[in-house]
Image: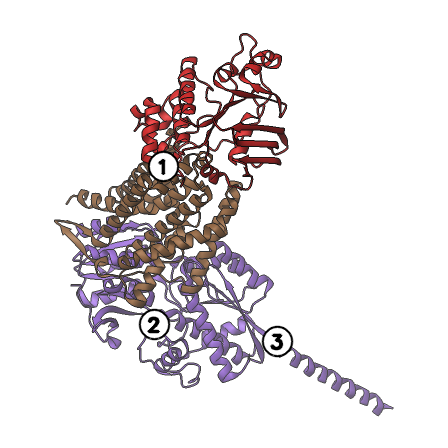
Chain colours: A red, B purple, C brown
């Protein structure tokens, strides 16, 4: 299997605070890989580095074998990597349809827009029924579907998902994960970052555990499930999604009220 | 021995004498400092530029006829830009008097800044002579009071209205209805009381008093309300951009009002060009227009030539017709220089006496002798002319309609 | 004789003008979140461009508008790239100081080049009016209103249906997500600013035959544009149009129906803003925090 994405020795953070000390991971074609970690462990920092929204202080990001560190964030989607960001980050004042159209803004995706749109509506019938609704008015689960659908509009080779289950009721999480699996079945490789370890390991082929800015453990889904580390840290009984957590260093959200439109 | 003593006395006497002569000739290398506050930027820049031109031209003419000095003194001219700003004007006056120690002040222009200049000037016991070739607001006159060192070489607001009313009386009689529109700035509010007073005294009926906002983009509301009172005469008290805006909107509204009376704006090329066709039949009143056939002064034919010659020289130098403030500032500067030349002094009381006594003819026409006005003891050029813009060929000209002896036209109704 | 017909005519025409004045400003502010204190000066430059083309070559302002708009677009783009881009992430006060300074410089260059004299273009239609009974519709203002409506409609259509129009709206709502879509956010900022300048310049061309042109005409218009955008609330073009008309009607209403009202009619604008902000801090149409 060819290596699609590889992060090597990434060192990154915000201002004075180092979040990722030395992170390395790979995603191969056709895989579903999960990156699990506690609140504030650097999961979102990782996705921001690989999409180019955050410049790392050290290390290398490569896609399909070529280093992409010097490629600007808005050009990375042309390569075939697309992100459904943390917190959904839909365009709240735009309709579902408009959000999806924007997903295919890139040169790579635009010519196939019509076809992709039909595919996404088929994959997420709930979006089809809400086509003309303002995205900001939808429920959390619907917005998550939209974020994924929008990422798919870019016709990516690798779909990256940042905490797709965050803040969603268990039933909705199920729906979202079903959609992720259906997507993978279409031939899209998946990297998803999760706090909900049970759900993540239920569909992933492989996984990485992120702790203290490094990969603490890597292996197949079964290996992770059986590892002492994962069991104690994440699978202990009665843990809620948001456990007691260290202070989370968040990137400044660029979502604004109102906007223009 | 006695001879020796007297020799010594003579020698000392000669020494003192020559020292005295030496000292006084050194003092005669003194300076005549003129302070010239002017609005070289900001909303009164149109006036400030005229002030500057008038003063500079006067200095050039003086240099050409008399040389670099006046009364044996080197002439030093200090311009200060008021930026059409009141606060800045105050500091400028303070600086000119206290720091620069000017001997005489000419300016500033624009009623607002001129008014602001009064208190700082008055507070100095040793204030210099102040010649003001602008500033019509009666507020200025009231605040200056009967000050002996103040010389006003422009018309007070009420002169505008006295002349307007006399012109109207002569042309159409007083059984007419007058509607006022005035701006709420210093200009409008300064003029409205005098205008109303003289109009009422003459026997006209005042049917409207519409206040409009200075700088407004739309005067329609006032125009509509005025039109409803069916006046014979629309009397507008405004300046600069308001005068432009108002004239255009009055024209567009086709009010049907037969007579449109203004103050100073109708003579400004700037106004005429900006309003185009809308200038038709507006009257204006001014201290000076082109084409008045005033003669030269026999004593100073080069400095104070006939009006036509002066205009021609101005046209040759600046490439355009002179405007009223340029004429006023020119004459005022020449008078100041003549005063210093004649008295060989910059002492204010000496200059004052000379200025009061002088009686030169000038391109401003009517003689420059200072006479008392309502409050000011030294007022010159208060007599004004009333004119009307009328279409001639492809353009417009100013026809003088009052006073009768220099008129070349009669008041026309607006069609 | 009722004042109502003329009051309605004047208010509507003024509302159209105010809309045009505000929309350029709203676009730049809504997208880049930078308060462009030089917007008034772009209006002024457009007015002077129209004036010189009219006075020098006898060209009708409406005829030269497309060319002048393109020029305004280019100048806005250059200005953004040269100066504004540098303060995108700077503190607000820096941004304000920069654009304010740019505005002042442009103003004073205008005074030096063209003097402070009042100017105006006087094409045929500028001084004519359509009479309806006792009321009249000045052609100049009618055309101004018409141009405003046209430009605003074009802008709204472009924002709604064009690829980059949609991109502009996206950037205004979430610039990181927009980047993920492949949108060059800096380029969109420049585009928005350039469009804003183009609209400002168009406003100037239109008002050159409606109000008086001086180098200082820009700032009072900017103040009104800010007022309208605040009243409307962020994020809504429709809201901004409503805000423009509310202001126009309020000002004209006071001028017509309150004795000596026109003296302080423009002060009404600020009373209105204060009142609206007290009741609805996000403006009439603004979105409260989700």
To which quarter of the image does residue B286 belong? bottom left
The lab-note entry on whether marks 2 and 1 share a chain reads: no
Asked which secondary structure carries label 2, the reply is loop
Between the residue at mark 1 and the residue at mark 3, the CA separation in whole angstroms equals: 64 Å
Foreground residue among A88 and A159: A159
Subunit bearing disc 3: B
Quarter location, residue A168: top left
| Circles 2, 3 touching at the beta carbon (< 8 Å) | no
Which residue does the numbered mark 3 point to in the structure image? B30
Circle nearer the N terminus (2, 3): 3
Q: How far apart are labels 2 and 1 at the CA level?
A: 50 Å
- Residue B57 image position (x, y, % from top left): 45, 76
What quarter of the picture does the N terminus of chain B occupy?
bottom right
Residue that carries the numbered disc 2 in the rendered image: B288
Q: Which residue is mark 1?
A: C231
Badge 3: residue crowd in 10 Å (few <14, some 14–19, many ≥20): some
Q: Is residue B264 above or below residue C276?
A: below
- Residue B294 in percent (x, y) is at 33, 80
User: Subunit of mark 2?
Assistant: B
């Amino acid at each position: 299997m060819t290596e699609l994405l590889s992060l090597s020795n990434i060192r990154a953070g915000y201002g004075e605070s180092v979040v990722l000390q030395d992170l390395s991971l790979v995603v191969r074609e056709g895989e579903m890989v999960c990156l699990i970690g506690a609140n504030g462990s650097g999961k979102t920092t990782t996705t921001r580095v690989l999409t180019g929204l955050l410049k790392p202080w050290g290390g290398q990001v490569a896609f399909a074998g070529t280093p992409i560190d010097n490629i600007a964030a808005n050009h990375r989607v042309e390569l075939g990597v697309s992100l459904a960001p943390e917190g959904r980050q839909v365009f709240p004042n735009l309709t579902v349809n408009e959000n999806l159209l924007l997903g295919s803004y890139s040169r790579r995706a635009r010519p196939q827009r019509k076809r992709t749109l039909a595919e996404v509506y088929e994959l997420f019938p709930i979006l089809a029924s809400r086509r003309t609704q303002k995205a900001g008015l939808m429920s959390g689960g619907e917005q998550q579907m939209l974020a994924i659908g929008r990422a798919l509009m870019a016709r990516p080779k690798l779909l990256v998902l940042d905490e797709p289950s965050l803040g969603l009721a268990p039933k909705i999480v199920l729906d979202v994960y079903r959609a992720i699996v259906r997507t993978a079945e279409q031939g899209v490789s998946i990297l998803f970052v999760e706090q909900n370890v049970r759900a993540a390991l239920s569909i992933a082929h492989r996984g990485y555990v992120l702790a203290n800015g490094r990969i603490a453990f890597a292996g197949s889904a079964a290996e992770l499930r059986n590892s002492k580390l994962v069991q104690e840290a994440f699978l202990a009984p009665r843990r809620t999604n948001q456990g007691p957590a260290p202070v989370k260093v968040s990137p400044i959200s660029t979502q604004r009220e109102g906007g223009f439109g | 021995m006695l001879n020796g003593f007297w020799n010594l006395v003579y020698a000392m006497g000669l020494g003192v004498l020559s020292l005295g002569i030496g000292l006084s000739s050194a003092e005669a290398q003194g300076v005549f400092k003129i302070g010239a506050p002017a609005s070289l930027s900001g909303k009164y820049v149109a006036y400030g530029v005229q002030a500057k031109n008038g003063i500079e031209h006067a200095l050039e003419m003086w240099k050409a006829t008399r040389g670099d000095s006046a009364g044996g003194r080197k002439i030093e001219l200090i311009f200060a830009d008021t930026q059409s700003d009141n606060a800045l004007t105050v500091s400028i006056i303070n600086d000119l008097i206290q720091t620069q120690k000017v001997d005489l002040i000419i300016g500033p222009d624009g009623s607002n800044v001129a008014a602001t200049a009064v208190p700082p000037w008055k507070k100095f016991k040793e204030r210099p002579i102040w010649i003001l070739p602008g500033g019509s607001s009666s507020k200025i006159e009231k605040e200056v009071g009967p000050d002996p060192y103040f010389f006003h070489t422009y018309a007070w607001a009420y002169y505008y209205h006295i002349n307007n009313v006399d012109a109207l009386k002569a042309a159409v009689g007083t059984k007419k209805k007058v509607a006022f529109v005035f701006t709420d700035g210093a200009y409008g509010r300064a003029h409205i009381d005098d205008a109303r007073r003289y109009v009422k005294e003459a026997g006209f009926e005042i049917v409207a008093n519409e206040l409009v906002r200075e700088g407004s983009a739309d005067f329609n509301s006032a125009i509509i309300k005025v039109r409803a009172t069916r006046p014979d005469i629309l009397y507008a008290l405004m300046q600069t951009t308001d005068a432009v805006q108002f004239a255009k909107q009055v024209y567009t509204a086709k009010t049907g009002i037969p007579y449109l009376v203004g103050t100073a704006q109708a003579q400004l090329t700037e106004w005429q060009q900006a309003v185009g066709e809308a200038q038709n039949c507006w009257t204006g009143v001014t201290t000076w227009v082109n084409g008045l056939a005033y003669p030269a002064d026999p004593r100073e034919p080069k400095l104070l030539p006939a009006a036509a010659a002066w205009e021609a020289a101005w046209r040759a130098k600046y490439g355009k017709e002179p405007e009223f403030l340029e004429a006023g500032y020119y004459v005022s500067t020449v008078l100041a220089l003549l005063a210093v030349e004649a008295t060989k002094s910059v002492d204010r009381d000496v200059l004052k006496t000379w200025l009061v006594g002088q009686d030169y003819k000038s391109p401003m026409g009517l003689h420059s002798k200072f006479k008392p006005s309502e409050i000011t003891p030294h007022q010159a050029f208060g007599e004004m002319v009333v004119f009307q813009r009328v279409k001639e060929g492809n353009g417009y000209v100013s026809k003088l309609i009052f006073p009768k002896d220099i008129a070349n036209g009669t008041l026309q109704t607006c069609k | 004789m009722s004042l109502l017909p003329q009051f309605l005519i004047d208010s509507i025409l003024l509302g159209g003008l105010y809309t045009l004045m505000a929309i350029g400003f709203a676009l730049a502010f809504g997208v880049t979140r930078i308060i462009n204190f030089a917007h008034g000066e772009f209006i002024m430059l457009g007015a002077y461009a129209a004036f010189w083309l009219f006075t020098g070559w006898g060209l009708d302002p409406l005829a030269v508008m497309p060319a002048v708009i393109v020029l305004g677009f280019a100048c806005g783009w250059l200005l953004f790239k040269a100066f504004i881009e540098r303060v995108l992430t700077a503190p607000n006060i820096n941004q304000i100081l920069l654009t304010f300074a740019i505005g002042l410089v442009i103003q004073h260059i205008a005074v030096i080049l063209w003097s402070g004299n009042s100017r105006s273009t006087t094409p045929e239609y500028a001084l004519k009016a359509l009479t309806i009974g006792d009321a009249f519709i000045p052609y100049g203002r009618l055309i101004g209103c018409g141009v405003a409506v046209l430009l605003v409609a074009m802008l709204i259509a472009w924002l709604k249906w064009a690829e980059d129009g949609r991109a502009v709206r996206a950037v205004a709502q979430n610039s990181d997500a927009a980047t993920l879509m492949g949108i060059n956010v800096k380029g969109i900022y420049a585009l928005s600013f350039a469009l804003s300048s183009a609209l400002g310049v168009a406003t100037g061309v239109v008002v050159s035959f409606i109000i008086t042109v001086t180098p200082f005409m820009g700032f009072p218009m900017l103040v009104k544009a800010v007022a309208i955008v605040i009243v409307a609330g962020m994020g809504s073009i429709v809201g901004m149009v409503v805000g423009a008309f509310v202001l126009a009607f309020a000002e004209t209403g006071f001028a017509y129906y309150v004795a000596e009202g026109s003296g302080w009619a423009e002060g009404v604008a600020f009373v209105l803003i204060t009142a609206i902000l007290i009741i609805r801090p996000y403006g009439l149409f603004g979105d409260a925090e989700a």
